[in-house]
Image (spheres, helix red, strand yellow):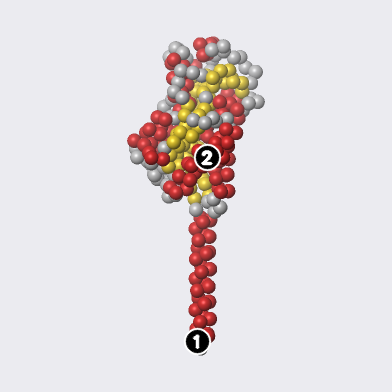
Amino acid sequence: MLKKQLARGASALSGLALALVLGLAQNAAAAEMTISGAASLTDAFTELKTAFEKKHPGLTANVNFAASNPLLKQIQEGAPVDVFASADQATMDKAAAFKVVDPATRKNFARNDLVLIVPAGGKKPAALAGLGKFERIAVGNPESVPAGRYAREALTAAGQWESLQPKLIMGESVRQVLDYVARGEVDAGFVYATDALKQAGKVDVVLTASGHQPVLYPIAVALTGKNPKMGRAFLDYALSPEGQAILAKHGFSKP
């Protein structure tokens, strides 16, 4: 009888151990996080998150890309986001002011350049002042797209912003501006150097714009997500030598 009781007890403990293992495996498999990044980070962060997932088996890292301001609005409205990476300091300043990111985790992790592009083989102005001869010039909407704000600063510094108003075609993201130029729907446009690299066969870079704030990308752990631990881990990975190498592969430089 005693032997049978011991056997039943051992079997029960074995079953409990198996249930715990399966439960832990299911939890690991169900682990998720969400990364919201500026549109210009699409290719770099897609590769970065895949490499990050390989380092954390069972983790699913969802990525969400758009212009920085709409991403911030989503977070303000309660979207479950664990990491927020914007293309400018102003948007991250707002995120901190709205208390939707942890300011202690905020870091600059990448640098970019704003460039003027034209369709491949198209006419090229010698300077920003030459844009007055063009009919359609695409820029990101400065109210929501950081690249548009940088473009406005550059054109204002060059004394061209007001005079070019009738010619400006506003894009909802820097990637939309890139598409306009690559398809030849506009004569010129302002995008990041990393975007121009993506469409190297369809657009020509005319010049690197100046007269604007440095294009520095900040990243921080967002407070609306459910996995802040992995959020911090992803942030650290983006800043690591391996993460920086992936960013450099896509045209970004160190901050």
Whole-angstrom CA distance, mark 2 to mark 1, is 59 Å
Q: Is residue 117 left or right of residue 223?
A: right
Answer whether residue 181 is visible to the viewer in this image. Answer: yes
**Upstream in sequence: badge 2 or badge 1:** 1
Q: Position of residue 71 (x, y in %)?
A: 44, 37
Q: Taking 187 as reference, is 77 above or below it? A: below
Name the foreground residue: 72 vs 166. Answer: 72
Please tell me which residue is depicted at 50% across the width and 63% down the height of the picture.
23
Q: Which mark is residue 2?
A: 1
Q: Nearer the viewer, mark 2 or mark 1?
A: 2
Amino acid type for the residue under numbered disc 2: Ser
Q: Taking 155 as reference, is 83 above or below it? A: below
Please tell me which residue is depicted at 54% across the width and 43% down the height of the picture.
49
Name the foreground residue: 175 vs 216. Answer: 216
Answer whether residue 76 is visible to the viewer in this image. Answer: no
Residue receiving disc 2: 240
Q: Residues within 10 Å of mark 1 (few under 14, many from 20)?
A: few
Q: Residues within 10 Å of mark 2 (few under 14, many from 20)?
A: few
Amino acid type for the residue under numbered disc 1: Leu
Q: Position of residue 224 (x, y in %)?
A: 40, 45
Please identify the quarter of the rendering in which residue 96 is found: top left
The secondary element bearing badge 1 is classed as: helix
The secondary element bearing badge 2 is classed as: loop
Please tell me which residue is depicted at 58% across the width and 26% down the height of the picture.
196
Q: Is residue 200 left or right of residue 31?
A: right
